Image (tube, helix red, strand yellow):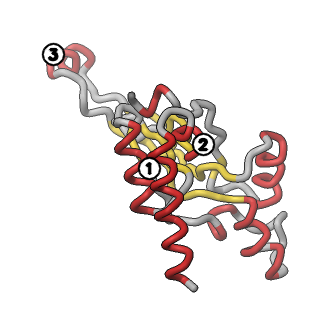
Amino acid sequence: MQVREIMSPLVHTIPATSTLEEASQLLRDRNVGCAPVVEEALVQETRLKRDVLDKIGFAPIVEQEVVVGVLTDRDIVVRCVATGCDPKATLVSKVMNHDFTCCYEDEDVAQAAAIMEEKKVQRLFVLDRVERIMGVLSLHDISAVDPLATGEVLQAMEKGARAKQ
């Protein structure tokens, strides 16, 4: 079974240039605790076949959202509110977490579970093969189709938590 079959496809992104106040409102309005942080990037499309390039005479430039981090409601509270910074003036890029984990939509669910187990995370951003964000895969999504893999991920997370103590 592929990741795309069980992932949550509706992903709400937050621009890195948003303020934390704007990001907080987006998280609240969408009833989510985290979202990928993106930057707009111009990407030259080089995958066109040579005959198409010869006909049109140029390689088109397309805009694409590039995932640069993740922002959680906890990041806002711990890295901003608790330290006295102003959410109206602080950009998402200043407090987002640059460490996030991804998988591909055409990967097997077991591979995604192995990534979760290795990285000790409960969520993966799901990308297509040209690196566009397509969705989120949660441990809960996996539990519906592979309870054994879910247990292994949770055990790895528990071991990691004990090792930090």
Could you say which is closer to the camera, residue 38 or residue 45?
38
Left/right of residue 151 with respect to residue 93 in the rendered view: left
Residue type at mark 3?
Answer: Asp
Q: Kindly check if marks 3 and 1 are in contact, taking CB atoms under 8 A apart as contact.
A: no
Q: Which residue is mark 1?
A: 102
Q: Residue at x 75, y 68 (%)?
A: 90
Q: Which residue is mark 3?
A: 51
Q: Which residue is mark 2?
A: 140
Q: Residue at x 66, y 48 (%)?
A: 14
Report the Cα–Cα distance between label 3 and label 2: 46 Å
Could you say which is closer to the camera, residue 78 or residue 8?
8
Badge 1 marks a residue whose secondary structure is strand
Badge 2 marks a residue whose secondary structure is helix
Report the Cα–Cα distance between label 3 and label 1: 34 Å
Could you say which is closer to the camera, residue 135 or residue 20?
135
Could you say which is closer to the camera, residue 83 or residue 87?
83
Q: Residue at x 64, y 70 (%)?
A: 94
